[in-house]
Amino acid sequence: MVRAWYMDDSDADQRCPHMTDPIQPVELDQLKNIGVLHWKLSGNESDETLTGIRKDRGYTYEDLIEITPEKLPNYEQKIKSFFEEHLHLDEEIRYCVGGSGYFDVRDKDDKWIRIELEKGDMIILPAGIYHRFTLDEKNYIKAMRLFVGEPVWTPYNRPAEDKDARKEYLKTLGLAA
Ligand code: KMT
Ligand code: NI
């Protein structure tokens, strides 16, 4: 099971878990309700279930990103921009093949849910959802990025209410745009 929880509002480092005490867990169904999909796979780059998902959803592009100062060009700047609250006009699809990290997503009430990504976790964030990413205290992740067609990674920082992807997303939640 993927671990997800509502974040506390402490000003501790972004890489800390930011769990409340007691923990307020978030179930897979609750993630699904806000359009976030998750699978637990083997963690291998070639995984049978992954092949199926790729085919079903039409993902034609994939690459690997390693987030560590030695391997990621403009590391400091990228780390910073990953953690700015933003959305994309397309899905964000990530499959963790090593290390770990946190995706934070907003729920319907605009509260932060933290989703832990460990080896084998695959996550799809819908177009138009506000989110951000941070490494955890172990400071390393290796992830596969997938996409339909030529990849576009452009983030639109909040507020991005004028974007069609945002309006469409709010409609799927049953919230007025
Ligand atoms: C993104 O777009 O936020 C990233 O690619 C960083 C996280 S990849 C696990
Ligand atoms: Ni993003």
Image: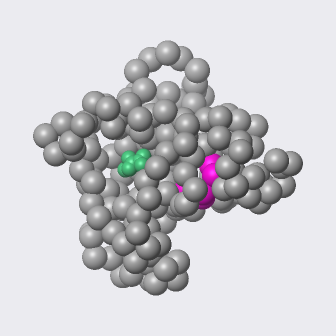
Q: Is residue 170 above or below residue 51?
A: above
Q: Residue at x 49, y 57 (%)?
A: 92
- Report the span colored magenta: 125-129
Taking the view exactly as shown, the residue that stands out farthest to the top is 11
Q: Count of labels shown?
A: 0
Q: Is residue 163 left or right of residue 125?
A: right
Q: Is residue 85 left or right of residue 137?
A: right
Q: Position of residue 151 (x, y in %)?
A: 41, 64
Q: Is residue 118 above or below residue 78?
A: below
Taking the view exactly as shown, the residue that stands out farthest to the front is 162
Q: Residue at x 26, y 44 (%)?
A: 67
Residue 162 location, quadrant: top right
> Looking at the image, which is closer to me, 94 or 41?
94
Residue 123 counted in the magenta span: no
Q: Main secondary structure of the magenta part?
A: loop
Q: Residue at x 37, y 43 (%)?
A: 101
Q: Residue at x 27, y 69 (%)?
A: 44
Residue 40 location, quadrant: bottom left
Viewer can see residue 128: yes
Q: Position of residue 142 (x, y in %)?
A: 27, 53
Residue 48 location, quadrant: bottom left
> Looking at the image, which is closer to me, 160 or 94?
160
Say how the picture is coloured: one colour
Q: Position of residue 56 (x, y in %)?
A: 52, 83
Q: Is residue 128 left or right of residue 170?
A: left
Viewer can see residue 131: no
Q: Position of residue 110 (x, y in %)?
A: 70, 36
